[in-house]
Image (cartoon, helix red, strand yellow):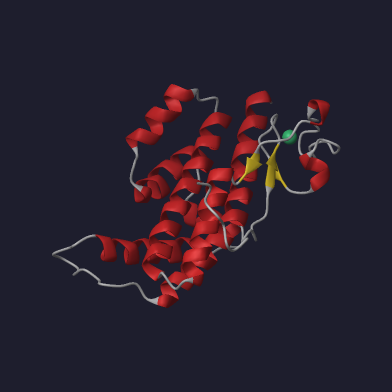
Amino acid sequence: MKHKDPVPVDVTSTFYECPTCGSLLDGPAFADGRQACPVCGATVAGGAQRRVFPTDRLRRLDSRIRRYHEDGENEIVVILAAAFLEAILEDIIDRILISHGADLPVRRAVLDAQRAIGGRISKLFPQLTGHEFEDVAAELGFRDFPRRWRDMREARNAFIHDSPFHGAKESIDPRMASQAMQLLDQAYQLFVLMTNRFVADGRSRETA
Ligand SMILES: [Zn+2]
């Protein structure tokens, strides 16, 4: 049986990837190839569709999180939003690796070697970009994002893990769920800006 979606929620923007330089841009003219990439000038042959960001899989997850938020399922909202942000960060890191010329086995090895989200933010990201995640976020206009993201992970961990050190939490505050929704919205813009800075940048370095 096909799953019925009772609430058509799709408030997120769609961004389209330039296959040549990796820039993510919005706008219908760019999407179907009528407009050349404003960064590198490449066009899409035959009006073919460009690869989209976020992917359909992330978009479906986004819709489900919004439904859970409407239903007041604070714990599920925070757990899924945290998973969502981690998936987006992995996507960005993977795009940065590709821009450095890494092939699939290398990308897999690098991401496997650093599974923990904290390490990906504090070690992998600076190693690949030469910048601290917090500094880049602040520079792009999202200064509070890393701290609020960390707070959300801590709330999730306190709920999920039965920690003898910090004490387990039986529930998650509705304010934290609202904060998770704000982070979700900001994540799209922030990660597109980060991709355009480090992915398009990396590929133009390659060809320079
Ligand atoms: Zn381009």
Identity of the residue furthest to the front in this view: 1
Location of residue 7 with respect to 106 vertically, above or below: below
Image coords of residue 82 (percent x, y) = 42, 57
> Residue farthest to the right?
34
Q: Number of marks in the image?
A: 0
Q: Is residue 188 left or right of residue 120?
A: right
Q: Nearer the viewer, residue 15 or 38?
A: 15
Q: Position of residue 158 (x, y in %)?
A: 27, 65
Residue occupying the point 64% across, 37% down:
201
Image quarter hosting the C terminus: top right
- Left or right of 56 in this view: 34: right
The quadrant of the picture showing ligand 1 is: top right
Q: Tell which of 164 and 98 is nearer to you.
A: 164
Q: Is residue 183 above or below residue 121?
A: below
- The image quarter in which residue 157 lies: bottom left
Instruction: Say whether residue 75 is visible.
Output: yes
Identified at 82% across, 26% down, the residue is 46
| Direction from residue 28 to residue 73 in the image, left or right | left
Q: Nearer the viewer, residue 65 or 137?
A: 65
- Give the residue at x 61% y 34%: 202
In this view, 195 is above or below 84: above
Residue 171 against residue 97 in the figure, above or below = below
Is residue 137 visible in the rendered image? The answer is no
Instruction: From the top left corner, tell me how far across and down residue 16 is, in percent.
Output: 70, 42
Query: Residue, x 81% and y 33% (percent of image)?
Result: 41
- In the displayed structure, does residue 180 sit left or right of residue 50? left
Q: Position of residue 188 (x, y in %)?
A: 59, 54
